[in-house]
Amino acid sequence: MSSSKLLDAFANGSGSDAAAAARSILASGIQPQEWSKDTVERLLSAVNPPNWQERSLGSNVLFQVVSIVKLLTREPSLNEPLFAPQFITSLAQFVHLGRDAAPFEVDQAAEMEILKVFANLVLLRRQDTVQVLVDLDILPRIVDRAKSLPMAYEAAFLWYRILFLATADSTHVSIVVERGVDHYEPLLDALLSSNEPGAGPFTKASALAEVLKTMFNLASHTIQASPLFSDATLVQVARVLSDLPPTVPLPMTAPHSHAIHVLMNGDPSGTAWCTVPFVEALVARLLAPELQICFGAGDTASLATLVGHETPANDRLAPLFVLLTRLVDRGGVEVKGAVKRLLAPADLDRSTSNKSDAPPKSVAHALIRMLTSVEFPALREGAEELLFALFDGWYSWFVRFVALPLSSFSFSNTGFGPAAGFLVNRGLLSGDMLKAAAASAAGTAAASDVNPITGTKDQSPGPDDWDRMTDEEKEAEAERLFVAFERLNKLGVIKAVDPTTGQEIGPFAKD
């Protein structure tokens, strides 16, 4: 049966006929060549609460029809009528989001299907659709409905996906904030404590991710003297990082990455969530595994992007470095001491920290190696700022840590080491410091012979070794050089030229 006849059966038939027609349309799928704007409008005109009540159509038919509408959202040539305020109003009435609610209840499955359509519409035309939701007073009702507990993972995902998209810029954030944000504490607690198994894309992790993304938008776009979210709410956010098992293989992905972003907007000073166990969990559950993966191949090239993952290490790890630095600066003496014991221990063995042919032995070794990363400036700067904060901004202690164990530090064999770049960028490496370092390295007035960056003394040229050789030694050396030269010539590394003719010689010579 053609789509036109099926639509007639749906629009004019009884409950069973309408249900059968809807099932047939779903089974055959949306064929754009068989549909038109008028066809879509005929379908949508029948999707309204008065028509539903008059024809005694149930939630099962509504679910099927809204599933058809969801398919239509994916067809750019057909979805224009779906954005009409009249259709959005009718759809909202079914789930009690409109000014005039439907005089009957729909089941959970139909409600979730309607929310999926709303989420798709907002995603496709975010600004225009959100404005319609505001004009029709639907957005405030979405906020209120999103507070309801208990809430299944699917419901949390869909309600907060809509709110996340609606608050992507600051235009309508005030509408959401004015409805209150105190519900985020019990909501996060309920989701974290839930034993629901989850199904498909709707899991505990995905639901938490949408909630946390919405919280980040609200905090980022709200300017006020006091924190937007209470300390009790941020305790629940911290639980995401300390209690929820990290994602495998990359821990710093949703929802943990979103929790990091939310906490970055808070002040850890004197809060209940900024504790020693929390920072220990951050390092053990997130930072250490990520760095182990990054340096597993023994070189910084493996930091770029793991196979099959679209988020580069720069984007994943930089926020974690920022949060750890804030915890060191504002989290109190005990928290700072805990981070220092984990990331900058005084007894760290520095003999293997910069060997690029082997994975770092510890998180501290990895951080030191990160200081010389050229490929990933965000990670390098994050590691520099974190270690610098651990030493209270004292460049000398910072240099001593990254160069050698504190008990045996000496500029004479370290210089500024991996700290040199950071000190230059911060304007801390002055000419006087270079002279002092060189003098310390040389131990004499001949400081100009010392390289203050590497800490090694430049050797003055000695007598020409060639003049001291015997004839036999000179002949052996010449033969060795000739063999090496010939090998490079055959590989095409160098270009050999016949001095008598000026022409190239060797396998790559031009005729």
Image (cartoon, rainbow, N blue to C red):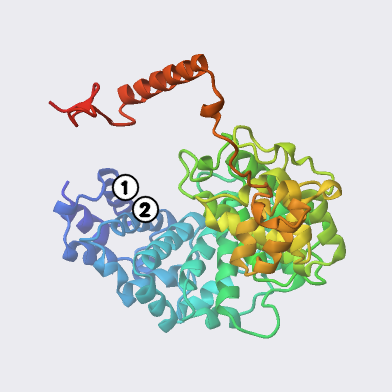
Q: Amino acid at mark 2?
A: Gln
Quadrant of the rendering where the C terminus is positioned: top left
Say what amino acid the circle numbered 1 marks.
Arg
Q: Nearer the viewer, residue 190 or 259?
A: 259
Label 1 crowd (10 A; few <14 / some 14-19 / many >=20) = some
312 horizontally vs 24: left or right: right
Q: Do tag 1 and tag 2 residues touch (Cβ < 8 Å)?
A: yes
Q: For this rendering, which residue is in front, 207 or 499? A: 499
**Residue shown at 58%/44% (left/top)?**
250
Question: Tag on residue 23?
Answer: 1
Q: Is residue 207 visible?
A: no
Above or below for 396 versus 345: below
Q: Secondary structure at mark 2?
A: helix
Whether residue 119 appears in this view of the structure is: yes
Q: Which residue does the image show at 77% across and 46% down from the upper left?
A: 404
Of the pair 156 and 361, the residue shown nearer to us: 361
Question: Which x, y percent locates residue 236?
Answer: 73, 61
Q: Residue at x 78, y 66 (%)?
A: 392
First in sequence, mark 1 or 2: give its number. Answer: 1
Residue 474 place in picture, x, y as percent: 48, 20
Query: Which label belongs to residue 64?
Result: 2
Category of crowding for the residue at label 2, using alpha-carbon neighbours closer than 10 angstroms: few (below 14), some (14–19), many (at least 20): many
Image quarter of residue 297:
top right
